[in-house]
Image (cartoon, grey):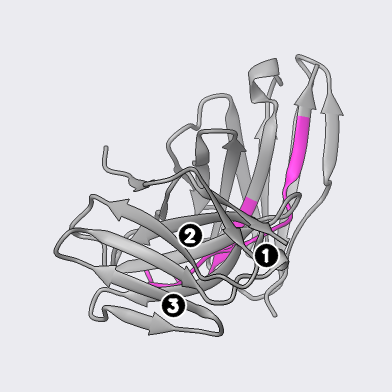
Amino acid sequence: GESVGLHLPTLSVQEGDNSIINCAYSNSASDYFIWYKQESGKGPQFIIDIRSNMDKRQGQRVTVLLNKTVKHLSLQIAATQPGDSAVYFCAEKYTGGFKTIFGAGTRLFVKA
Amino acid sequence: DVKVTQSSRYLVKRTGEKVFLECVQDMDHENMFWYRQDPGLGLRLIYFSYDVKMKEKGDIPEGYSVSREKKERFSLILESASTNQTSMYLCASSFRAGGLQSQYFGPGTRLTVT
């Protein structure tokens, strides 16, 4: 079956640096993509989403980039803070579908 | 804010016991989901429901059943718990069936079956 994957299982960054978390997806029918953050002991929390008619979307300190040509999604976190330490999941969905496909997750460590 | 609550944060059950995990959402969402989360395996969908009394199997429904008698409540049932069902269980909801929107997750229930 098709799935969403991540290039790196762990990422370690210095506090204040920018973080980039990458994700590859394989279902060309997917037209909606989401990034979730999961802190230890908590459920995943929505960060930002993007629809396939866009290639970039910005939030507060976060930016999601979508490259449909190579089926690649990335999450950029500006000025990474200790509170950003968590596991980040990308997810995909398509119009009319009930299911969301989640990636395995990348653990982000922020060094003080 | 959407709130999804789960009845227990931690549960310890014995093999063979019947286990009920309850989930309640307060935003009138149509869709509700049950996932299990295991290290290295990510989130795997057990069952979902897009309406009251409606249910659909996810990717790993074996050993589980669900109940949705009211729109706001979705229950996961382990008919006879086994040790391989030790896991983190996450409930989620989303607004409209087939729509493009994110899911809202509860805090999770960590179930240990001994």
Estimate the x, y position of residue A106 in percent, counting from the top left.
51, 49
Per the model, the C-alpha gap separating discs 2 and 3 is: 31 Å
Task: Identify the chain of the residue marked 1, using the numbered disc in the image.
Answer: B
The residue that label 2 is drawn on is B50
Where is residue A100, by image quadrant? Answer: bottom left
Q: Are marks 3 and 1 in contact (CB under 8 Å)?
A: no
Q: Secondary structure at mark 2?
A: loop
Quick one: label 1, few (<14), some, or many (20+) residues within 10 Å? many
Q: Which mark is residue B72?
A: 1
Please give the name of the residue rendered at 84% of the width and 46% of the height, measured from the top-left corner: B8
Q: Nearer the viewer, mark 2 or mark 3?
A: 3
Q: Chain of mark 3?
A: A
Residue A63 image label: 3
Q: Amino acid at mark 2?
A: Tyr
Residues drawn in magenta: B91-111
Disc 1 element: loop
Q: CA distance from mark 1 to mark 2?
A: 11 Å
